[in-house]
Amino acid sequence: MRTRLLDWIERAGNRLPDPAFLFLGALVLTWIASAVLAPVQFTEIDPRTLAAPTGPAPIRIHDQLTGTALAAFLARLVKNFTEFPPLGVVLVAMLGVGVAEHTGFIGAAIRALLGITARALLTPMLLLVSIMSHATGDTGYVLVIPLGGAIYAAAGRHPLAGIAAAFAGVAGGFSASFLPAALDPLLQGFTQAAAQIIAPTRTVNALCNWWFTSASCVVIILVGWWVTDRLVEPRVARVPVEPQDGASLLPEGLTPAARRGLVAGLAAMLGGLALVALAAAPADSSLRAKDGGLTSPGAPLMDAIVPLIFLLFLLPGAVYGWVAGTVKSHRDLVAGMTKSMNTMAYYLVLAFFAAQFTYAFRESNIGALVAMKGADLLKQAAVPTPVTVLGIIVITSLIDLLVGSASAKWAVLAPILVPMLMQVGIAPELTQAAYRIGDSTTNIITPLLPYFPLVVVYCQRWVPRSGIGTLLSLMVPYTIAFLASWSLLLLVFWGLDIPLGLQASYSYP
């Protein structure tokens, strides 16, 4: 039964077009739907007209297949792409991360953390390192996961348990992070654009979920620790280990030069944070808003979050490289930035098509109409608000089985879910937090995740007969435990009115 279901999911997912063409198809459907719905007279009041001088007016769908609309679309084609909200912030953040990764600073920090850990604390430390790798894009998949198997083997524990724990932290806890990551501004861009469908002046902070994702780290580590040591490792204990291709050998430890570089890089990072704190401390600091707040709307510090991420990875990465000897000149730093941009090539293609769909969807008014119709249905059904939020988590987790890209899913779902839930009093920041839970927890049980086959290969280095079913059986307990505990954490935050992050709210008036 499990194999048949897995085969069906794989076949269904393989039949889906590339996400870029999914956006192209969504664009065409939006054009057709706008032409069909434009003549229809709707009774729902457009919330954007409530404060208009002419008074409230019913919502109207704008036909995007008229000559005027198509001409405007062509004229806006380049601007749609270059002004796409997540594009610039993601690329800028990745420039700094690329230097830190290219010089070896990130890899050295990961090895140092795992190298000083006692055997009894190996699982929580491995989960912590896996979560920290979220700040560096895909580094966790290619470095932390295989390293987890090697370190478990060296400690006399089963390597499959180490691989499973690392995979759970890297992919299953993808939205948990103590540190701001590129995912934060990426999702924020879609969330803000979606909120502005019905509230043009509504803004969303890039770190609107930071407190929640930081607390999520603790939950993922504790729950992952229990699942690994109590469920997964006892189950694989009877599986014989047959190392292949030198899999039993640990990667080389830190050289003296790397240790010196790591100390210098961490000092540079702490120094940079201290400078920011000192600059923001005075009551008349230029980083503060007009009302004196650091996190108030319009505060320059909040607008500079992404540039600060760039600098606080660039600086320690460069210092590490010069001290450790991995950087000989400024050209090596440019090479690191170039390498990180090479990895973003596919994202640029995806962003181009997503930007065109987003523009047409916004201009058509379909998103606002769907939001109000959906909100009316929710009100008539009288579904408790927490149940609605849990429903978003479940729906997202199911979609994640077929569409692995976090940005691709949210680009489609945000223009529908965010404004719809705003109409029933749920703030965009809460909707985004719910989405992040569903987007993360099923990553580890879908073969359609691009790195899933690679993790199977990691397992085969230690247990040659491992396959997709082997990895799936290891990861299902993590998915169930993460989905339940993470959803509960969100409800606890909400119930106790603990801020989700900076400038975040639970309700929308």
Image (tube, rainbow, N blue to C red):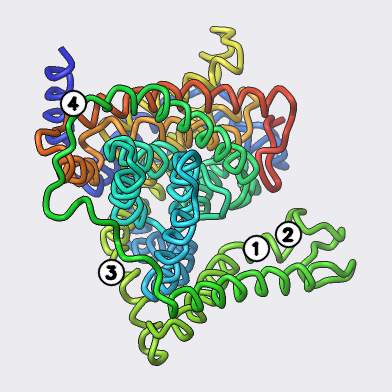
Q: Which of the two discs, 1 and 4, labels the residue nearer the N terminus?
A: 4
User: What's the CA distance linking mark 4 and mark 2?
Assistant: 46 Å
Judged by depth in the image, the label closer to the viewer, 4 or 2, is 4
Element class at badge 2: loop
- Residue at 53% across / 49% down in the picture? 188
The amino acid type, in three-letter code, at marker 1 is Asp
Q: Which of the two discs, 3 and 1, labels the residue nearer the N terminus?
A: 1
Q: Are marks 3 and 1 in contact (CB under 8 Å)?
A: no
- Foreground residue, 455 or 31? 455
User: What's the CA distance linking mark 3 and mark 4?
Assistant: 31 Å
User: What's the CA distance linking mark 3 and mark 1?
Assistant: 27 Å
User: What's the CA distance linking mark 1 and mark 2?
Assistant: 7 Å
The crowding category of the residue bearing disc 2, from other C-alpha atoms within 10 Å (few below 14, some 14 to 19, many at least 20), is some
Q: Are marks 1 and 2 in contact (CB under 8 Å)?
A: yes
Q: Are marks 2 and 3 in contact (CB under 8 Å)?
A: no
**Pointer 2: what residue?**
298
